[in-house]
Image (tube, rainbow, N blue to C red):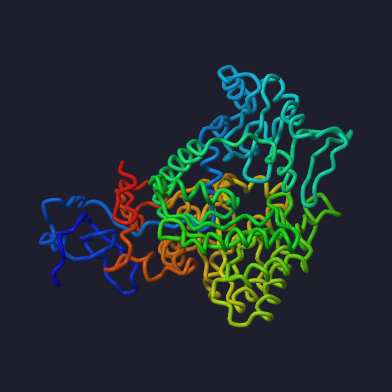
């Protein structure tokens, strides 16, 4: 064995799955200076590297895998939600409102009350959102913001007043201010209408933001996630992420996509890119925090994804396109012209078709763009011809089974069971040759390494098993979060595999996720998560 300095960390395990093609499981792995320095097929094969300061983890019943990537999630939103009213624990609206009432009782009058964002109304016994009147009943002394995911809000009367929303307010383009059958406000805002509230919300202090990122990133790490690709970072929040990095508050690596949702004109896109270019010029990227590119959205989600055929029971409704194709083409072209990458949300089949039209025109106008410059985020309802186009164009796709897991009932109501079952055709994507990576889309779906693997291999959802013919094998599901994820971010030389010289980003599991009972995966958590050689989670 080549001489090495003493290891900082040495793990002896029942199996070390390196994911290097053709390589048998190893039994020991050594880490020094944030890098993997050696592996051995014998559990004691690296004992010569044990020094006075070496931490030795003797876990003969455990399995080591690379740390997982979540290639489409929302860490910043998770951090903002850390201290929200935990309505995701409620089972009905009575409990939901009681939690808000309890928070109001210990919150000074006039202060905003906001909820956690990772819940679905269809999972409540009542299967609906709260109304403004119900929120007023919980408290009339506080503005209340109930948020579900990134694009849905319900406000009480005090919050509506502060946002300047009344019966005469018109929704911004791409947004909805919901009204009932009599034309009265329900309090619900959808898609770009949420911006009316975001501009009047009090900003938390920098210290509060950093502590939120510390807590949220640690929670990601506790599920086996070592890198997150945050797909909706407001450009002003880059400074908060930078400060969190400086304070050692980021337990995971972050690959940030700046939100382009508010950039509608060429001038607004250029202003966004100017700020990103300044980040690049200042050399602020490093292995912990890297600015990846810009995120746009071509259509809506469960209830607004753009479809070729109408919604179930709504013969005149096909969802919503959020951009005119020519305008999106101009925006994407401006971004890649500055050397940045672009990820675009596309949920319905019409949305995906229009997006591929845009991407194809960008590629024709700019031959030689580096692979992975243009990415489809979700590609939920992907027809065979659309999959063939994306693959022929070399467009990677990020998929999120946990999004389908939590949203299946909502989607069935809007699209019907057949189209819902067709979402995320993973088996077909892989068989046809796509570069596919996996994530969560938290807060719509739960994040976690093995809950995702469980979902992709069983197609289990809150509506039961949906589309089982699209399921993939466990090793394939793991690769979507590791090997493939590193290819997407252009880091295959450093991450995704366990081999000498690679970053020491790894996870230790109490059982072997590749052959344990499949139902055990759903709740399986690592005993240890290591990022850059440092233990960021230890149960």
- Is 94 situated left or right of 289 in this image? right
Query: Please, is residue 20 above or below residue 81 in the view?
Result: below
Q: Position of residue 500 (x, y in %)?
A: 26, 68
Using the image as rendered, state which of residue 277 and residue 92 is in the foreground. Answer: 277
For residue 180, say whether it is visible: yes
Q: Position of residue 435 (x, y in %)?
A: 52, 71
Using the image as rendered, state which of residue 312 and residue 211 is in the foreground. Answer: 211
Q: Residue at x 47, y 50 (%)?
A: 242
Query: Please, is residue 175 above or below residue 182 in the view?
Result: below
Query: Please, is residue 159 above or below residue 30 in the view?
Result: above
Query: Please, is residue 379 above or below residue 160 in the view?
Result: below
Q: Position of residue 312 (x, y in %)?
A: 78, 52
Residue 35, located in which quarter of the rendered image?
Answer: bottom left
* Screen quadrant of the C terminus: top left
- Is 401 situated left or right of 36 in this image? right
Q: Residue at x 70, y 20 (%)?
A: 140
Q: Position of residue 366 (x, y in %)?
A: 65, 80
Residue 335, located in which quarter of the rendered image?
Answer: bottom right
Tally the numbered discs: 0
Using the image as rendered, state which of residue 517 and residue 331 is in the foreground. Answer: 331
* Screen quadrant of the N terminus: bottom left
Q: Residue at x 38, y 65 (%)?
A: 495
For residue 469, say whether it is visible: no
């Amino acid at each position: 064995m080549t001489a090495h300095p003493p290891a900082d960390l040495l793990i002896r395990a029942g199996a070390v799955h390196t994911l290097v093609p053709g390589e048998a499981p190893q039994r020991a792995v050594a880490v020094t200076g944030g890098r993997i320095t050696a592996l051995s097929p014998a559990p004691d094969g690296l004992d010569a590297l044990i020094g006075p300061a070496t931490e030795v983890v003797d876990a003969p019943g455990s399995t080591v895998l690379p740390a997982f990537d979540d290639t489409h999630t929302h860490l910043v939103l998770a951090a903002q939600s850390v201290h929200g009213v935990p309505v995701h624990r409620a089972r009905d609206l009575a409990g939901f409102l009681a939690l808000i009432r309890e928070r109001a009782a210990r919150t000074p009058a006039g202060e905003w009350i906001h909820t956690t964002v990772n819940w679905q109304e269809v999972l409540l016994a009542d299967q609906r959102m709260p109304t403004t009147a119900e929120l007023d009943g919980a408290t009339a002394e506080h503005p209340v913001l109930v948020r579900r995911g990134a694009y849905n809000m319900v406000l009480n009367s005090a919050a509506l007043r502060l946002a300047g929303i009344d019966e005469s307010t018109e929704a911004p383009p791409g947004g909805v201010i919901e009204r009932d059958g009599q034309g009265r406000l329900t309090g619900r805002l959808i898609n770009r209408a949420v911006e009316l509230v975001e501009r009047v919300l009090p900003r938390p202090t920098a210290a509060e933001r950093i502590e939120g990122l510390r807590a949220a990133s640690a929670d990601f790490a506790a599920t086996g996630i070592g890198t997150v690709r945050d797909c909706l970072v407001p450009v002003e929040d880059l400074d908060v992420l930078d400060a969190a990095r400086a304070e050692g508050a980021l337990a995971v690596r972050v690959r940030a996509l700046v939100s382009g949702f508010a950039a509608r004109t060429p001038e607004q896109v250029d202003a966004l890119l100017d700020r990103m270019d300044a980040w690049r010029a200042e050399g602020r990227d490093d292995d912990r925090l890297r600015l990846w590119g810009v995120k746009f959205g071509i259509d809506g989600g469960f209830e607004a994804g753009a479809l070729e055929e109408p919604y179930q029971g709504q013969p005149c409704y096909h969802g919503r396109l959020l951009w005119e194709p020519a305008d999106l083409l101009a925006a994407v072209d401006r971004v890649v012209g500055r050397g940045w990458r672009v990820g675009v949300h596309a949920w319905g089949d019409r949305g995906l078709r229009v997006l591929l039209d845009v991407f194809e025109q960008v590629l024709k106008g700019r031959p030689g763009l580096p692979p992975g410059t243009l990415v489809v985020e979700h590609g939920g309802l992907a027809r065979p011809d659309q999959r063939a186009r994306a693959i022929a164009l070399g467009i990677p796709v990020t998929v999120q089974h946990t999004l389908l897991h939590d949203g299946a009932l909502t989607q069935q109501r809007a699209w019907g069971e057949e189209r819902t079952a067709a979402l995320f055709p993973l088996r077909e994507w892989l068989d046809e040759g796509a570069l596919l990576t996996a994530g969560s889309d938290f807060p719509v779906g739960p994040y976690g390494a093995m809950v995702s693997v469980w979902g992709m291999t069983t197609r289990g959802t809150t509506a039961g098993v949906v589309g089982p013919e699209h399921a993939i094998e466990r090793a394939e599901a793991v690769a979507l979060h590791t090997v493939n994820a590193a290819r997407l971010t252009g880091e295959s030389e450093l991450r995704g595999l366990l081999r000498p010289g690679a970053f020491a980003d790894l996870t230790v599991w109490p059982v072997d996720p590749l052959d344990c009972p499949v139902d055990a995966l759903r709740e399986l958590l690592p005993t240890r998560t290591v990022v850059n050689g440092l233990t960021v989670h230890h149960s």
